């Protein structure tokens, strides 16, 4: 028989690399929110789930169950083969740990495939995320990477993360760059996904003396940071990276690829156009229309983003430590040097 496990037991086994998580809900449910690291082997397609749901409400519970059994019976061999192709121990879950995951776990057990089932399903996992965040006490010191738009702060943090430094990549978790243009070329995450990714990362680094994060506003795209992290960021060590304008423009053009996303860029510019002095706004718009993206970006930085960033920087408790850097690699080196001086025994994710 299969074994039921709690959220905490599931996450511990996953953390040790001893478990593969399988979400057996429909593809639509999986895309909306899932436990990070899960694969999707749907018990029902989106259409089948809708059909059974309608039958459940309009006909009877038994009729819905009979129809569900009819659907899954026809595709059971291929359904089981997908699990057989996955090595190691597996855990399955659905919405409430009910029919879909119980039936899956039972069938797999009959086929001698060892499997766990998550008690309470993803609803129990979501409840754990919400309650844990509500009572979370952030222990590490926040080291906040500041810098004008285009400094490459996210790229810098990801380079540090690749070397094992305790980085909290808020933009990566939100699927958004945190500006009017922030979702161009990206798929924004919802609040549930953001909170799940954030909590797992924070728990990973709770014993580190510091965490590195970017100077984001409270809202990043569709996602909102919890208050304890906003407070930790505002009270943290502020490192302000001063980088040449041309280098910043180059980063923006590389990240946003305006030649590929021209229409989206023009549409996003419409949202800030009225906040820029009319002649300058008209000049920026003309540059965008004529594919002179470098000129457009330079004017937006000078007349919109840089002044706004200067104002936002006054919200921090401590005066930023300014650091003149030439490019991203130079910034990474300077930050590492600062951390070695500030934290004599630096802790990284791999220590």
Image (tube, grey):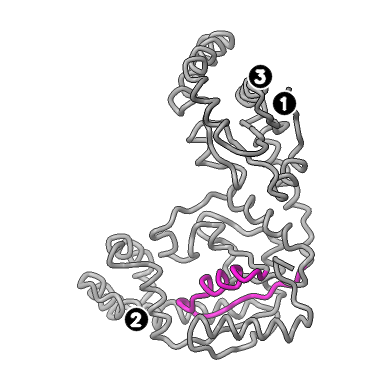
Question: Magenta segment, which residues?
Answer: 140-165
Task: Determine whether the residue tagged by mark 3 lies in a helix, strand or loop.
Answer: helix
Residue beneath disc 1? 2
Task: Determine whether the residue tagged by mark 2 lies in a helix, strand or loop.
Answer: helix
Looking at marks 2 and 1 on the same chain, the residue that comes earlier in the sequence is marked by 1
Between the C-alphas of marks 2 and 1, the distance is: 62 Å
Within the magenta stretch, is there residue 91? no
Residue beneath disc 2? 299
Residue in the image at 72% along x and 69% along y:
232
Query: Horizontal and vertical percent for residue 129?
Result: 70, 47
Query: Horizontal and vertical percent for residue 327?
Result: 48, 84
Q: Which mark is residue 110?
A: 3
Label 3 neighbourhood size at 10 Å, few (<14), some (14-19), many (20+)? Answer: few
- Of badges 2 and 1, nearer the viewer stands 1
Between the C-alphas of marks 1 and 3, the distance is: 9 Å
Query: Horizontal and vertical percent for residue 251?
Result: 41, 76
Residue in the image at 77% along x and 72% along y:
209
Within the magenta stretch, is there residue 154? yes
Task: Determine whether the residue tagged by mark 1 lies in a helix, strand or loop.
Answer: loop
Query: Horizontal and vertical percent for residue 279?
Result: 27, 80
Do labels 3 and 2 touch, CB within 8 Å? no
User: Is 95 left or right of 299, judged from the image as shown?
Assistant: right
Q: Quadrant of residue 281?
A: bottom left
């Amino acid at each position: 028989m299969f074994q039921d496990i709690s959220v905490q037991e599931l996450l511990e086994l996953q953390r040790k690399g001893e478990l593969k998580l399988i979400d057996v809900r429909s593809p639509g449910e999986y895309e909306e929110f899932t436990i990070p690291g899960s694969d999707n082997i749907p018990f029902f397609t989106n259409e089948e789930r809708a059909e059974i749901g309608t039958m459940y409400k309009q006909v009877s519970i038994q009729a819905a169950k009979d129809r569900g059994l009819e659907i899954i019976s026809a595709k059971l061999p291929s359904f089981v083969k997908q699990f057989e192709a996955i090595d190691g121990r597996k855990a399955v879950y659905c919405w409430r740990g009910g029919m879909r995951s119980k039936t899956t776990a039972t069938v797999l057990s009959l086929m001698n495939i060892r499997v766990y089932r998550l008690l309470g399903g993803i609803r129990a996992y979501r409840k754990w995320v919400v309650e844990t965040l509500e009572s979370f006490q952030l222990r590490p010191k926040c080291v906040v990477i500041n810098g004008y738009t285009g400094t490459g702060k996210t790229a810098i943090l990801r380079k540090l993360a690749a070397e094992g430094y305790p980085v909290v990549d808020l933009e990566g978790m939100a699927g958004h760059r945190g500006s009017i243009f922030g979702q161009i070329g990206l798929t924004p995450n919802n609040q549930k996904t953001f909170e799940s990714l954030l909590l797992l990362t924070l728990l990973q680094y709770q014993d580190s003396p510091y965490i590195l994060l970017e100077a984001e506003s409270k809202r990043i795209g569709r996602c909102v940071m919890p208050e304890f992290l906003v407070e930790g960021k505002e009270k943290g060590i502020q490192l302000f990276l001063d980088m040449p304008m041309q280098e910043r423009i180059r980063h923006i053009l590389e990240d946003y690829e305006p030649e590929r996303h021209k229409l989206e860029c023009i549409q996003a510019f419409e949202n800030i156009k009225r906040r820029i002095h009319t002649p300058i706004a008209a000049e920026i718009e003309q540059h965008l229309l004529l594919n002179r993206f470098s000129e457009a970006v330079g004017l937006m930085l000078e007349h919109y983003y840089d002044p706004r960033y200067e104002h936002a920087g006054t919200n921090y408790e401590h005066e930023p430590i300014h650091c003149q850097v030439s490019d991203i690699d130079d910034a990474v080196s300077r930050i590492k040097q600062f951390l070695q001086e500030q934290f004599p025994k630096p802790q990284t994710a791999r220590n």
